[in-house]
Every structure is written in C-alpha cells, then in structure tokens.
Amino acid sequence: MSVEKEYALDWIEKNKDRIVEISDKVWDFAELGLIEFKSSALLADELEKHGFKVERGIADMPTAFVATWGEGKPIIGIMGEYDALPGLSQKKAPRKEPLKPEAPGHGCGHNIHGTSGMAAAMAVKKTLDKHKIQGTIKFFGCPAEENFSGKVYMVRDGYFSDVNAVISHHPSTMNAADLRSSLAVNSVRFHFYGKASHAGGSPEQGRSALDAVELMNIGVNYLREHVIQDARIHYVVEKGGDQPNIVPAYARSWYYVRAPERDQLDFIYNWILDIAKGAATMTRTELKTEFLEGSHNVIPNRTIAELIVQNMREIGLPKYDDEDWEFAEKIATTITPEMKIAQLKKSKRPGWERLVDKVMDDEIADPWGEGETSHGSTDVADVSWQAPTVEFETATWVLGTPGHSWQNVAQSGVGLGHESLIFSAKVMAATSLDFLTEEEILKKANEEYRRRIGDKKYRSPIPAEQKPPLDAWER
Ligand SMILES: [Zn+2]
C-alpha cells in the first residue's frame, strides 16, 4: 500500500470516534428528503471546520451542498446522502420496536451513506495537503434520494460538469461493486377534475373523476401486454372521492413508469399520457399531469469497480466484536431462510450459494452483472451520465435483511453499521487517492465511460422550469 493511502486510512482510524458520532447523530435526526436541515448542516459544518469551502443551498435545495478542497485537475467527487424514510422509526434493538411511532427512520442506512463520504473526503484532503499532491476533492451533499431525486437537480444545474470521476457508497447486505445498471424512471401524478352531484338524486349532473382514474388504470393494465419485459409500471390511487353519495369531483393517481433506457421509457410514458387523456375524454373530466421526478439508468464502470474491489481487499473486511455478532445473530432469527435465499439468488452474485449459511457477507466478490439490470432506480444514475461513477456497497446488514425495513434502521445505528461506515470511508479515500496519484487509472475509467455512453445524449428528465418540491411534506 502506498504511503499516501496509509496516511489516509490512519487518519480515518484515528478519527473513528468522531466519525461514528456524526453518523449516529444523523441516525437520531432521521430527517425526510429536502428537509434534512440538521443532518446536512452537521456534515457541512464539519467539512468547513476541516478547511473545505462549502457552498450551501445549491440547485434550489436548502439541504444540498458541495464542499471543495484543493486546486486544479483532477477533480474527484464523493457523494453522500442523509435522508430517512417515513414511518420507519425503530430502536437500536434486534426486535421490531419503534423509537417514536410513525416517525421517520434510517431504513436505507443513509446516516452511514452521508458520513462515510464526508470522512473519506476529509482523509483525502489531509493526505493531499501533507503529501503536496495536486488536485481537487469535492464532497457532494445530496438530499432526497428516496423520493425527489436531489442529484438530478444538481446535475441539471451543472454541479457535476467538471468532475473527472465520482464515487459513492451505499450500506448493504453485501460487499460489492457490481456492474448492473438500473431502470430509468418517471414519477408522475394524474389529477382528474369532474363535477360533484348527488349520486342518487341527480347522477346525470355529475362527472366522476374517480371513473377517469379507474378507466385510466384499466387502459394501462391492458397496455402491459405490449411493453418490454424489463419495464415496470406501478400506481396508487391517492384520492378517490369522499363518500359514495357524492359523485367524486376530484380524484388522483400516482404512477411510476420504469424501463432500462430513457427512449424505451419515453415510448411507454407517452402511451400512458394518451391513455390518461382518453380516460378524461371518456368521462368528460379535465386532466392535469404533474411530473414529480425522473432519473436515468446507471452507466456502470468496470475500471472503477475493479479498483474499488482491489482496495476493499487490500484494506480487509471489518472485524466484529462479540456484541456485534450477538446483535447480528438475533437479527438473523427475524429473517426466514426463504427470504434470504430469494434475496441471494436475485443478486445473481456468482457463488451466492456459499452465503446461505452465513450471517454476514465475509467475502469480497469480483464485480459481476455486466449487461444486467436491477429493477430499482436511483438518482446516482444521472451523475453516471456526467462522469465515470460507481456506487459500491459494504456489508452493514445481516444477509437476507429486506430493504427499507426496521431491521435496516436498527443495524445502521449499532456496531455493524459503525464498522461498515469506517470500512467504506477507507475504501473511498483509497480509491480517490488512486485517481489523484495515478493518471492512467483515471484515463482508463474515462475512456470506458465514453465508450459506454457512445453517441447517446443526456437530457434532463425533469422539465427545465421545474423546481424541487420543497413543500412536498406539507402537502
Ligand atoms: Zn438508499
């Protein structure tokens, strides 16, 4: 290992207590997307204290920021998220027990996500400074990953236009830097406006907005026969009227439409817009569409993924103490073998069978999944269209733990989460230093990026005049 990397890892080790403290504070704050005021301020203040120049409230989001240190090229970006999920409040206990009923909780481990990136950026800064290395390190504080795609606004406003490579880390059940893509997505609301009337006495005077919602859903469900295999269409009816003896004057549905590539998504999405218009025509109601958010598919990068795996192996997996193991074993009893096997199989990780009888992932897999698509979506994707980008994972949660669950919340705030936090910060610091000290790697990652993008053009999925929905939680 190079002296530069050793210095960075040593800095993280020496500052472990403070790093863990910050992650636990963000866990306590458990703030929802776009209102992560305390969490983003905590991370931004810490970076500022360590000499970073911090620009807050970027891309029209009060909780988005970028912290910069250094000068000139290369410019390496590290991303962090800090939003929690609604209703997932949970104690740091291996049984389901809310801390504050119905309050938010860190069900996706974003307390670790934000803090690991912050710690890595600080360790890189210390190292560049000490070893007089040329280059710039940027930490991107990215709000609202879970619901409003904060990064897409940051991309649209040009905050990623000058970076040469970007890395990001996500807590997981596995240690992995895989090569799967994700689905591009549009999230949109359909508002239908009809006319209220007595449903018994004068139904002929009414125009039912609920009928429009239902007919639209029927139309879309018939469309399913004619979409590609990997597309996903799902909806909820958010509002369907007040009581049966009033013809509903207003009704509303909320759709997610997903497909592997943006043009495939556009094709299905435009068809759905036509179906919505058709439903309005059939019912003589008015339609208003409200575009909420969208993102692209991830462009993977093998060069960076391999580099990350190499660094993970060089650093070595965390060692858990007895207390960590005890917690992990108890969580494992809440996960059925069927759930666990289904999750492992779905990961398509070569040799996943070896993990069936294990509690924690104790291997570091080679990058896998080239040409495959996982069926979720992420706003990391839009960054991956700007520069070579990889979001890797480290084992934080017991194998088989379902996503967005109380088990995730609990594990993200205890020793298992702390170990994953420190390990991932080290991996990000080491990988950033590789980029900053070895020109060839960065060149190779960029060549691969350009090859994968080819002549495809990035077009922001959100309309040009659209602002982030800062009042979303009040509505
Ligand atoms: Zn997440």
Image: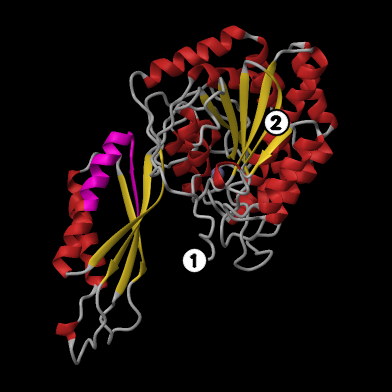
Q: CA distance from mark 2 to mark 1?
A: 37 Å
Could you tell me which secondary element the residue under label 2 belongs to?
A: helix
Q: Which residue is mark 2?
A: 425
Dominant SS of magenta comes to: helix
Q: Is residue 148 left or right of residue 171?
A: left
Nearer-N-terminus badge (2/1): 2
- The amino acid type found where label 2 is placed reads Ala
Q: As displayed, is residue 348 above or below residue 434?
A: below
Give the image quadrant in which the ligand numbered 1 is located: top right
The answer to whether the beta carbon of the residue marked 1 is less than 8 Å from any atom of ligand 1 is: no
Q: Which mark is residue 475?
A: 1
Q: As displayed, is residue 389 above or below residue 20?
A: above
Residue 189 rendering spot, x and y as whole percentages: 35, 58
Could you say which quadrant of the image residue 311 lies in?
A: top right
Q: Is residue 264 magenta?
A: yes
Q: Circle 2: is it few (<14), some (14-19), or many (20+) Cα within 10 Å? A: many
Q: Is residue 149 left or right of residue 213?
A: right
Residue 407 rendering spot, x and y as whole percentages: 61, 53
Give the camera-side residue of 203 and 361. Answer: 203
